[in-house]
Amino acid sequence: MKTEAIEQSIINNYKILAKKTAVKSNQGDIKTIWGLQYRQNNKQEGFVSEIGSIGRKKAKIEIRNNELKTIKKPLFSTWNKTLKNINTMLEDIIANFDNPNVVTKKYVNLLCFPRDCAERLAKIYRECAKK
């Protein structure tokens, strides 16, 4: 496969995982963020997160605005081989999504403040820091 086709496949597989894993929080200001750990031979081999980070062994890429941003690859590996390995991992995660021995699902709840509340907290922090 050509590199552009592999990149598009990675983006499509990421979208599939995002749809499968998405969780709606019904607790107002609390936002739930998901992450997946990929395991092979009882060792963590990679991860995928809602913020667009994807990693496998020493390779790491990010997806922003439906575009692939290459971040890091192993020293003695080509980008094409690195992207193929990440794409294979994503396909394996999709195929084994409900198998807890391969895919571990993690969720983190974040409390989001409205802008005015965050500004008041920042003001209080600045006042306390002066003392």
Image (cartoon, helix red, strand yellow):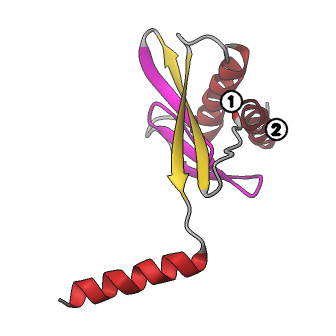
- Specify the label residue 113 is tagged with: none
Q: Quadrant of the N terminus?
A: top right
Q: Amino acid at mark 2?
A: Ala
In the image, the segment drawn in magenta is 43-71
- The image shows residue 94, relative to residue 23, as above or below, that is above
Quarter of the image for residue 21 reads top right
Quarter of the image for residue 42 reads top left
C-alpha separation, residue under disc 1 versus residue under disc 2: 11 Å
Q: Is residue 34 visible?
A: yes
Q: Main secondary structure of the magenta part?
A: strand
Mark 1, residue position: 87
Q: Quadrant of the C terminus?
A: bottom left
Residue found at x 67% / y 13% = 96
Q: Amino acid at mark 1?
A: Asn
| Comparing labels 1 and 2, the label whose residue is closer to the camera | 1
In this picture, residue 31 sits left or right of residue 74: right
Residue found at x 54% / y 36% = 107
Q: Residues within 10 Å of mark 2 (few under 14, many from 20)?
A: few
- Specify the label residue 5 is tagged with: 2
Residue 110, position in %: x, y?
52, 52
Residue 19, position in %: x, y?
78, 35
In this picture, residue 18 sits left or right of residue 42: right
Q: Nearer the viewer, residue 128 or 56?
A: 128
Residue 36, position in %: x, y?
57, 30
Q: Secondary structure at mark 1?
A: helix
Q: Secondary structure at mark 2?
A: helix
